[in-house]
Image: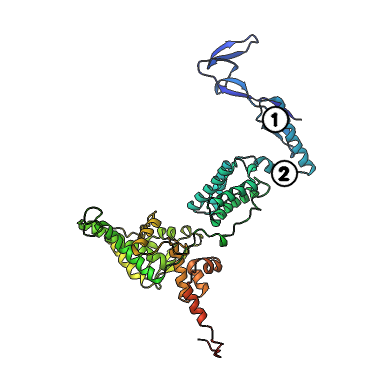
C-alpha cells in the first residue's frame, strides 16, 4: 500500500507565543512573525513544551523491491506533483521486481542527480586513501572544478562529452597546448571512472573524448644545457647575489659594482650564491625534480657511504615509489662544506632541509641565465627552465654512453620510452659522431671506424 501525506513535526514554541484554549478543548500557540499571524497545536512532551506543525513538502510511504516499507520525502509542496513522484518510484519498484532494472541501476538512477561538488568531497577522500600527495589532489580537484564551472556541469547527469569537447576546442583556439588539454581530459576521466565504480553513474561520458596529439602540438618544448652552458650557469649563480648587492643602480656610476655594503651583507650574499650554485648542480647531477629536492633533509644525505647517495622518500617522489640516488664524486666535497657551514650556524639537525628551494626558483633561474648570457629560448623556441635541468641530466647520461636501462633507472621512469623520447636531447653533432662510426663501404673498408 502506498500513500502520500504531510508529516507532523515537533518544533520549539516560538518566542513571544501566547497559549490559548480552542473550542475543541485543545490548546494552541498563537504568535505574530513579520506581520503574519500563525497558529499551531500546542502540547507538552517529555522534552518540554512543543508545537505541532505539518511539513511543507509531502512525504511518500511505499514498499520497495525488497518488501520493506520506505518513507521518502517527495520534495513537492503540490499534492498532484507528489503523487506523480510516488508513481515514478512505484514504477521503478515494479521494474526491479520484473528484472528489467537491477538494484544497482536503481541506486545509480538516484545518485546521478547528486551535485558534483558533493561527490568531489568523496573523490578527495578516495585520493587521500590511495596515498596521493596533497599537491596532486589540489591540482586534480582544481582542474575538475574549472571544467565543470566553464561547462556548467552542476550535477553528475549534466556531464556530457559534447560540451566538454567544445570547451577543449575553445581552449585550443585560445592557445592551450595539447599536453595541457590532455591533463584536463585525464582529470575528468579519473573522476568519472571513480563515479562509475561507486555506482554514481552508469558509464563514463568522456570515454570517447579523443586524446590530443602532443607530438604535433608542443607549446613548451624544453632543451638540455650544453657542458659550456652548465659551467657558465653555475658560475653566474654563485656570482649574481654578490654582484646585485654591490651594484650601483643610480647616479653617474650606475651599473658599476663598487657600492659600500656591510661585511655581513657581503657574506650573506656569497652564501646565497654558494647555495644556488650547489642547488643547480644537484639538480643536474641527480635528475631530481624541484619539489623532490625541496623535500631532501640532512638526515637523508649519506656522504660517507660507498657510494655516497641521497634517499628520496616515497611520499616525496612523483611516482610514490621512493629512490636511492648516487651522488657524483665531484659534488660530494662541495656538499660536505655546505653541511659544515649549516652545522656552524646551528642548522644541521637531521630534519633540516638540505637547501632552501624558493617557490620562485623559475624566475630566479631566468635571471641567472640572463646573467650568464644564456638565451632562455633558442631559435627553435625550446626553453630552459628548472625542469630542463632534469632533461640535462638525462642527456648527459646518453652522451656518456650509459645504457638506456641505466638511464631509465637514474631518471626513475617506469617506461624506457619516456627516458629516450622526452628526456634525451642529443644535438646534431652527437648524432653525426654516431653516424660517422659506420664503416666506409664506398672505399671498400668494411671495418668499423
Can residue 342 be seen here? no
Q: Position of residue 347 (x, y in %)?
A: 31, 58
Residue at 52% across, 73% down: 404
Q: Secondary structure at mark 1?
A: strand
Can residue 120 be seen here? yes
- Mark count: 2
The answer to whether 204 is drawn above or below residue 347 in the figure is above
Displayed quadrant of residue 353: bottom left
Q: Position of residue 142 (x, y in %)?
A: 52, 47
Q: Position of residue 317 (x, y in %)?
A: 47, 60
Farthest residue toward the front?
A: 252
Farthest residue toward the right?
A: 98
Q: Earlier in the sequence, mark 1 or mark 2?
A: 1
Which numbered disc covers residue 60?
1
Residue labelled with disc 2? 103
Closer to the camera in the image, 428 or 46: 428
Give the alpha-carbon distance from disc 1 to disc 2, as whole Å.
20 Å
Amino acid at each position: 500500500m502506498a500513500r502520500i501525506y504531510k508529516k507532523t513535526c515537533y518544533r520549539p514554541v516560538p518566542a513571544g507565543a501566547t497559549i490559548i484554549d480552542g473550542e475543541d478543548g485543545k490548546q494552541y500557540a498563537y504568535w505574530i512573525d513579520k506581520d503574519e499571524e500563525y497558529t499551531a497545536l500546542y502540547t507538552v512532551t517529555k522534552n518540554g513544551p512543543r508545537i505541532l506543525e505539518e511539513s511543507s513538502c509531502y512525504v511518500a510511504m511505499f514498499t520497495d523491491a525488497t518488501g520493506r516499507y520506505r518513507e521518502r520525502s517527495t520534495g513537492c509542496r503540490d499534492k498532484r506533483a507528489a503523487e506523480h513522484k510516488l508513481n515514478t518510484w512505484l514504477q521503478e519498484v515494479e521494474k526491479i521486481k520484473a528484472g528489467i532494472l537491477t538494484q544497482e541501476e536503481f541506486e545509480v538512477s538516484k545518485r546521478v542527480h547528486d551535485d558534483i561538488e558533493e561527490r568531489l568531497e568523496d573523490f578527495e577522500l578516495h585520493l587521500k586513501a590511495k596515498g596521493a600527495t596533497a599537491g596532486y589532489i589540489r591540482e586534480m580537484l582544481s582542474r575538475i572544478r574549472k571544467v565543470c564551472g566553464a561547462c556548467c556541469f552542476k550535477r553528475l547527469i549534466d556531464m556530457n562529452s559534447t560540451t566538454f569537447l567544445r570547451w577543449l576546442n575553445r581552449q585550443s583556439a585560445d592557445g592551450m597546448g595539447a599536453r595541457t588539454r590532455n591533463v584536463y581530459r585525464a582529470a575528468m576521466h579519473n573522476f568519472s571512472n571513480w563515479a562509475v565504480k561507486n555506482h554514481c553513474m552508469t558509464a563514463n561520458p568522456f570515454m570517447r573524448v579523443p586524446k590530443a596529439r602532443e607530438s604535433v602540438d608542443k607549446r613548451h618544448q624544453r632543451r638540455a644545457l650544453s657542458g659550456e652552458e652548465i659551467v657558465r650557469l653555475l658560475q653566474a649563480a654563485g656570482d649574481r647575489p654578490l654582484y646585485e648587492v654591490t651594484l650601483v643602480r643610480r647616479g653617474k656610476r650606475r651599473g658599476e659594482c663598487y657600492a659600500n655594503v656591510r661585511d655581513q651583507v657581503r657574506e650573506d650574499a656569497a652564501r646565497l650564491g654558494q647555495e644556488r650554485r650547489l642547488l643547480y648542480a644537484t639538480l643536474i647531477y641527480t635528475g631530481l625534480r624541484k619539489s623532490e629536492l625541496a623535500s631532501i633533509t640532512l638526515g637523508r644525505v649519506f656522504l660517507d657511504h660507498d657510494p655516497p647517495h641521497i634517499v628520496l622518500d616515497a611520499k616525496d617522489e612523483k611516482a610514490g615509489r621512493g629512490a636511492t640516488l648516487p651522488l657524483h664524486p665531484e659534488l660530494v666535497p662541495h656538499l660536505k662544506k655546505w653541511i659544515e657551514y649549516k652545522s656552524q650556524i646551528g642548522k644541521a639537525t637531521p630534519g633540516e632541509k638540505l637547501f632552501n628551494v624558493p617557490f620562485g626558483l623559475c624566475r630566479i633561474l631566468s635571471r641567472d641565465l640572463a646573467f650568464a648570457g644564456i638565451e632562455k629560448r633558442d631559435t627553435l623556441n625550446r626553453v630552459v627552465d628548472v625542469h630542463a635541468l632534469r632533461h640535462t641530466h638525462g642527456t648527459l647520461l646518453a652522451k656518456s654512453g650509459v645504457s638506456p636501462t641505466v638511464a631509465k633507472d637514474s631518471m626513475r621512469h617506469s617506461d624506457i620510452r619516456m627516458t629516450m623520447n622526452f628526456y634525451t636531447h642529443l644535438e646534431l653533432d652527437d648524432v653525426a659522431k654516431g653516424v660517422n662510426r659506420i664503416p666506409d663501404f664506398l672505399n671498400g673498408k668494411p671495418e668499423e671506424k
